[in-house]
Amino acid sequence: MYLEDIQINSEVTVENIVIEKEEMLDFAKRYNPAKIHTDEDFAKNTRFGGLIAPGMLSFLTVWAQYVSVDFAGEDLVAGKSTAIEWLKPVFAGDILRGSAHVTGLSFRNEHNGIMTVTIDVYNQKGEKVLTSIVESVVKRRPSSA
């Protein structure tokens, strides 16, 4: 969808995603091997009382589903930036769902512009566990000159 066709406040929901313990451990061992993510004995003695998922895993599980319903679709050119704020820990077995809404649109040139999307992720208790602001480059409608 061209940038001109996207509406501010448009919203999509990313349905439930279960954080599986083995996937969480595999991801942590490969990309974020901090003990809070990989060592159960260590994690039991922290304020969390157990292993927590790496923040990027929590974001990426929702992101992977969002991409399939992205507002721009085939007119997405590229990502520009992503800011993530982690608000609560995510544990193995947690069920995450996301809500994405368009919070900004701006024109850069005659070919493309920037779409800003805010993604809020909640656990099964309805607690917001993270929020992300993503900027993407999106095609503009070709001029009829």
Image: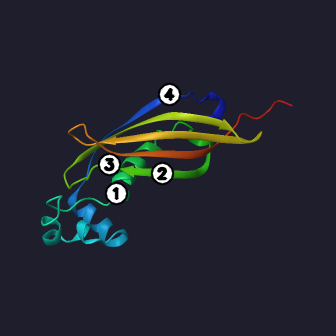
- In the picture, the disc for residue 73 is none
Q: Quadrant of residue 54?
A: bottom left
- In the picture, the disc for residue 9 is 4
Please, what is the three-letter code of the amino acid marked with disc 2? Ala
* Most foreground residue, 18 or 114: 114
Q: Residue at x 27, y 61 (%)?
A: 24
Look at mark 3 in the image and give the residue it sits on. Answer: 87
Disc on the earlier residue, 2 or 1: 1
Q: Residues within 10 Å of mark 2 (few under 14, many from 20)?
A: few
Please, what is the three-letter code of the amino acid marked with disc 4? Asn
Nearest-to-viewer mark from 3 and 1: 3
Q: Measured along the vertical axis of the image, is residue 4 above or below residue 64? A: above
Q: Position of residue 28 (x, y in %)?
A: 31, 67
Q: Residues within 10 Å of mark 1 (few under 14, many from 20)?
A: many
Q: Are marks 1 and 4 in contact (CB under 8 Å)?
A: no
> In the image, 98: left or right of 44?
right
> In the image, 127: left or right of 111?
left
Look at mark 2 in the image and give the residue it sits on. Answer: 83
Q: Are marks 3 and 1 in contact (CB under 8 Å)?
A: no
The Cα atoms of the two marked residues, 3 and 1, are separated by: 10 Å
Disc on the earlier residue, 3 or 1: 1
Q: How is the image coloured?
A: rainbow
Secondary structure type for disc 1: helix
The Cα atoms of the two marked residues, 2 and 1, are separated by: 12 Å
The Cα atoms of the two marked residues, 4 and 2, are separated by: 19 Å
Please, what is the three-letter code of the amino acid marked with disc 1? Gly
Secondary structure type for disc 2: strand
Nearest-to-viewer mark from 4 and 2: 2
Q: Position of residue 72 (x, y in %)?
A: 57, 38
Nearest-to-viewer mark from 4 and 3: 3
Disc on the earlier residue, 4 or 2: 4
